[in-house]
Image: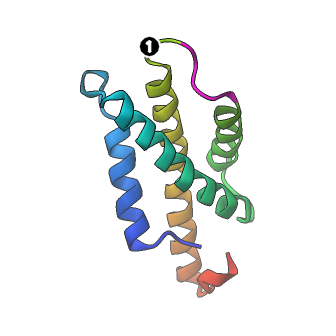
Amino acid sequence: MKPTRVEIDEVTRLVRRTLVSYNLKPSNEAVADLTRRLVEHGQRYVVRARKLDGVAPRVTNALADWDIETAAGPPPGPLGNWDHARSLARHVRTLHNALLEEGRRREAVGQRQADV
């Protein structure tokens, strides 16, 4: 299923806020909130992306990387949580874009969104 307009806007803001340069890193509390929200969206996107037929290699890689990243958790060190959030954001962005593209493709060929 293609992401909704609200979901598209929310995920876009979330990814942009997470992928800022290191000198704009948010507080540790904000990083924890970003991470929580990224995991929520990522889990939904992973379920949807695994239902796609013939996914592109970048989607297959993003799914594998998502599994590794979520299993491993943040690395040790002062920027571990921030690095973890940024990695999650990159995977969410890849899956988000893939689901949008698949939704557009299905619309172009006349398939219903419920079929995904």
Left or right placement of residue 66 versus residue 8 in this view: right
What percent of the width, then of the height, locates residue 37? Answer: 47, 49
What percent of the width, then of the height, locates residue 23? Answer: 25, 21
Q: Secondary structure at mark 1?
A: loop
User: What residue is disc 1 on?
Assistant: 78
How many C-alpha atoms fall within 10 Å of the one at disc 1: few (<14), some, or many (≥20)?
Answer: few
- Number of numbered discs visible in the structure rendering: 1
Q: Is residue 79 above or below residue 15?
A: above
Q: Nearer the viewer, residue 50 or 35?
A: 35
Question: What residue type is disc 1 on?
Answer: Pro
Q: Is residue 10 above or below residue 25?
A: below
Q: Nearer the viewer, residue 2 or 55?
A: 2
| Quarter of the image with the N terminus in it | bottom right
Q: Residue 102's quadrant in the figure?
A: bottom right
What percent of the width, then of the height, locates residue 28? Answer: 37, 28
Magenta-colored stretch includes residue 108: no
Left or right placement of residue 20 versus residue 37 in this view: left
Q: Which residue is found at the position 53% from the left and 81% from the top?
A: 108
Q: Which residue is found at the position 70% from the left and 47% from the top?
A: 60
Q: Nearer the viewer, residue 51 or 33?
A: 33
State whether residue 95 appears in this view: no
Q: What's the magenta region?
A: 72-76
Colouring style: rainbow
State whether residue 88 appears in this view: yes
Q: Is residue 22 above or below residue 34?
A: above
Q: Which residue is found at the position 31% from the left and 29% from the top?
A: 27
Left or right placement of residue 78 versus residue 105 in this view: left
| Type of secondary structure dominating the magenta stretch | loop
Q: Is residue 99 above or below residue 71?
A: below
Q: Nearer the viewer, residue 28 or 65?
A: 28
